[in-house]
Image: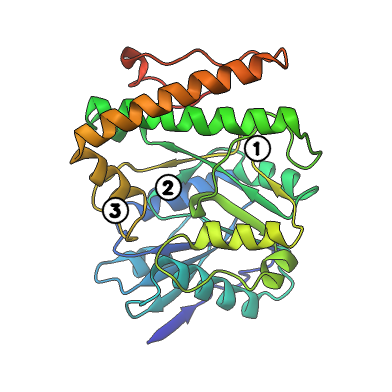
Amino acid sequence: MKRLHVPPGWGNSGFVIVIPAQNEALRLPVALGAFARDGKARDIIVVANGCTDATASIARRYPELPVAVLETARLAGGVGEARRLGLQAALRVAPQTEIVATSDADCVVMPGWARIVLASLSRADVVCGRVVPDPVEFARLPRLVRYHGVLEDRVSALEAELQGLRSPVIHDPLPRHNQTLGASLAFRTDAYLRAGGFEAIPCHEDHRLVDRIEAAGGRIARPWKLTVTASCRLLGRAPGGMADTIADRTTRPAHLTAETGRLAWRARKLYRAITVYDAVPQPYPTMEETTDVLSLR
């Protein structure tokens, strides 16, 4: 079962964003509200994947911007298939679209998100945003989980910084990050289509697509200032996704303690490598800082 609703005038902007949603009636309006306030990213298509709540009707009737809705039965390919089908439907309706992007129903894009995406795509084929945790939900997680998360993000950022210092490229200048997540991804449409689009798989469809584009010579930008705030819920929608990862960490404190030690060692090593370039690395986080440290710059 597939049913497509397209409101009048939808798809004229040349910039389409697909949001997969599965029973997201509570969170979807917040996600849509962020795009409405952004102003430049107004052609949204929500893929209501096997929803049994009011997700589809909320999207269709959303008052602040026109939203296309693709309703499907439960998709075996999960979030990857939802993204794929949503963009296929969007490009059939609006074949002139020059930029396609994705986010998630439990995420909130930053003010000016579209402006940074458009600027980055003027010199790149793909732009990846940085995901930061919802501060209220993050503060409710166990202290060790928070500390591990901050260290993990810090190590990733330091790796990106060191790579940028060693091999600078015009399309991905510092400050930059190392994340590749479907919560904030945007593509030149031609690059997306040449790579075959998202695979119909329940997890890691984002990494796999960007890896294919990069392997074919595509330019990937990861600007530090491009952020999206994601929920820290423990019951998610995508198997192996962020919610599953967080939930697993809450049940394995011994493993997490050991992993935190390895991350701390890696962070110190990266700090030392960065100082060779006369760059100033960020302060090393303490346990007391973890409830407040949600970004690294």
Asked where in the image residue 213 lies, by quadrant, the reply is: bottom right
Q: Earlier in the sequence, mark 2 or mark 1?
A: 2
Whole-percent x and y of residue 253?
20, 33
Numbered disc 1: secondary structure: loop
Residue of label 3? 26
The location of residue 159, given as percent across then percent down, is: 58, 32
In which quadrant will I find the C terminus?
A: top right
Q: Which residue is mark 1?
A: 223
Apparent side of residue 181 relative to residue 238 in the rendered image (left or right): right
* Disc 2 residue crowd, few under 14, some 14–19, many 20+, Cα 10 Å: many
Disc number for residue 107:
2
- Quadrant assignment for the N terminus: bottom left
Can you see residue 7? yes
Of label 3 and label 2, which has the lower sequence position?
3
Say which quarter of the image contains residue 2.
bottom left
Classify 49 as above or below 213.
below
Identify the amino acid type marked 3.
Leu
Q: CA distance from mark 2 to mark 1?
A: 18 Å
Task: Kindly indicate the quadrant of the structure image that contains residue 71.
Answer: bottom left
Mark 3 and mark 1 in contact? Answer it, CB < 8 Å. no
